[in-house]
Amino acid sequence: MSNRQTRAGVEKLQADSNPASAASKANTSPAHADSMPQWAQDMMSEVKKTNAGITKYREETKAEMEKWAKSLEDNTKAQFELLREEVRLISETTISLANEMEARKKEVDGTLNDQSDSITSMETKLKEMEKEILKLRGRSEDLEARSRRNNIRIVGVREGAETGKKPSEFIAGLLKEKLGLSVTPTLDRAHRALGARRDGAGAPPRAFVVRCHYYTEKEEILKKAREMERTPEGRNGRIHIFPDYTQEVNNKSLLRTCGGVRYGLRYPATLVITPEGGQTKTFENPKDAMEFIKKTLNPG
């Protein structure tokens, strides 16, 4: 085979390998195909088979890809629908919870408003009750003080000294003897202070609470007692006589025990306090005076 024939066969083979060219060549007449060498015809047959296989593979691949894409699309749609359903359920649940919380919040707000109104009303009533209690306490203190205006307390009378005698008669005679009274005082009653009897060694005796029938006699007894306290014999005596004040008055009287402090009142109702070595202070308000005493004097 000459070189010219070889080049012609290669060019023909390249042209036939092109699908378009092969299709064109396929439409050529059998006479033309018969004029080709056998090896070229065999090669053309193989090329046609290869092209047919490629076309079939391409179609099958395309069909598989379309099938896979359709399956992926269907699966994605199913997953998306499932996800959308879950989101819908979550959204409905969230909305339901939000509505429930809003309803509860309104209920709580209403309850709080009611409670706030109730507390405000109770505070108002409580303040009124506190004022009323203070007023009643003042009245009670005044009534108790008035009921004791004829009373005296005697400290230092030995326990059991009145045994076998009427306490009022015993105390009346004791007062006449100790104070040197010209007449025996008239006493309505006399009794020991409440509490258990103390008979132990060194135990102080209970005080006697005595009610005088006449206010003037009570004042005379206290006057004589003060005079007796000023004498050495009286200070060394065994009994001491005091007014029978209420507990509230006794607590307030403790303020007078501060050493070196002088108290006084100026009209109209001005309290004067002069600490030892200090400047005189005047007060028209009892609360201000009490604050000054607590901060400055600090009584026990």
Image (tube, rainbow, N blue to C red):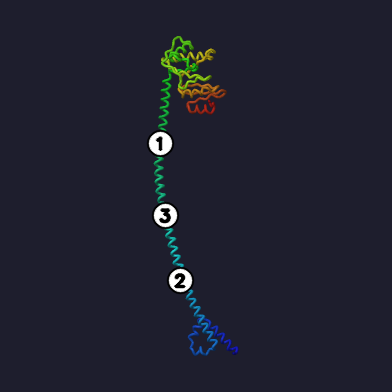
x then y, percent, for residue 184: 44, 11
Q: Depth-wise, is mark 2 or mark 1 nearer the camera?
A: 2
- Classify 127 as above or below 251: below
- Can you give x and y, in whole percent of width and height, for residue 247 in the image? 46, 24
Q: Position of residue 300 (x, y in %)?
A: 53, 25
Packing grade of label 1 (10 A; few <14, some 14-19, many >=20) is few
Could you give the CA–CA distance between mark 2 and mark 3, rounded to whole angstroms?
39 Å
Tell me: residue 285, above or below residue 149. below
Q: Where residue 210 is drawn, which disc sits there?
A: none
- Residue at 40% over, 53% down: 96
Picture coordinates of residue 36 (x, y %)?
Answer: 53, 89
Residue type at mark 3? Thr
- Which amino acid does the dot numbered 1 rest on? Met
Disc 3 secondary structure class: helix
Residue 122 bears which disc, if any? 1
Query: Picture quarter containing residue 124?
Result: top left
- Tag 3 or tag 2, which sits nearer the N-term? 2
Q: Which mark is residue 67?
A: 2
User: What is the count of numbered marks?
Assistant: 3
Q: Measured along the vertical axis of the image, is residue 228 above or below residue 36?
A: above
Q: Identify the residue at horizontal 40%, vertical 43% (top origin).
A: 111
- Mark 3 vs 1: CB contact within 8 A: no
Residue toward you, 118 or 276: 118
Mark 2 residue type? Lys
Q: Which residue occupies the foreground of this view, 220 or 196?
A: 196
Q: Compared with residue 193, is residue 100 higher up or lower down, i.e. above or below?
A: below
